[in-house]
Image (cartoon, helix red, strand yellow):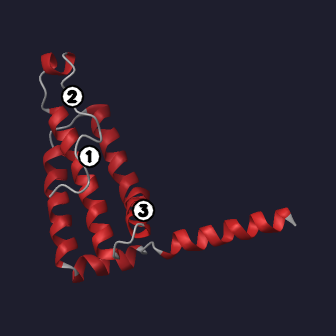
Amino acid sequence: MLKKIIISSMMIFFSISTAFALSTADYEKLLKTSPVIKKADAELNDIWKRVFKPLTGDYRKQILNDQRNWVKFERESDAQEFMQSGMSKEKAYEQAIKKRINRLRVVEYNSNLSEEDAAAGRARADDFYNSSEE
C-alpha cells in the first residue's frame, strides 16, 4: 500500500512539474510572439557576445558548457520555479532569462578584474545580482 502511495505521489509531482515547461518549439513561438521575451533574449544575446568573445582556453569552454546547460535544463527549471509561484509563462521565462543575464554580468565583471583586484577578493559571487533587476 505504501509503495502505491509513493508511486502515485511521484507521478503526480512529475506531471505537475512538467505541465509548466515549454517544448523547444513552444519557446521559439513565445520568442517570436512576445515582445517582452524578444527584448530579454536580445539583451541575453548582447551580453553573451560581450562575455564570450574575449574568453580563451578552459574558461571559455567552461562558460560555453554552462550556457549550453542553461539552454537545455536551467532555463526550463528556472521558469518552472517562477510559474509555480504564480507567474504567467511569459513573465516566468522573462525572469529566467534575466536571471541568466545577471549571472553573465557576474562573469563579465569578474573577467575584467585585474589580477590584483581578483587577489584582493573583489570578485563577485554568482548570485551578486538578483533576478528581478531590470
| Label 2 close to label 1 by CB (< 8 Å) | no
Locate the N terminus and report the quarter of the image it occupies: bottom right
Q: Is residue 8 above or below residue 29?
A: above
At 11% across and 22% down in the image, what residue appears?
Answer: 114
Q: Is 4 left or right of 90, judged from the image as shown?
A: right
Mark 3 vs mark 1: in front? 3
For disc 2, the marked residue is 123
Q: Of callouts 3 and 1, which one flags the residue occurring earlier in the amino acid sequence?
A: 3
Residue type highlighted by circle 2: Ala
Q: Residues within 10 Å of mark 2 (few under 14, many from 20)?
A: some
- Could you say whether the residue bearing mark 2 is in a helix, strand or loop? loop
For disc 1, the marked residue is 103
Mark 3 vs mark 2: in front? 3
Residue 59, numbered circle: none
Q: Residues within 10 Å of mark 1 (few under 14, many from 20)?
A: many
Q: Position of residue 85 (x, y in %)?
A: 40, 66
Number of numbered markers: 3
Q: Looking at this rendering, what residue extends furthest in the front direction?
A: 86
Q: Position of residue 20 (x, y in %)?
A: 46, 74
Q: Is 103 left or right of 10, judged from the image as shown?
A: left
How far separated are the C-alphas under marks 2 and 1?
13 Å
At 13% across and 27% down in the image, what residue appears?
Answer: 113
- Could you say whether the residue bearing mark 3 is in a helix, strand or loop? helix
Q: Quadrant of residue 55?
A: top left
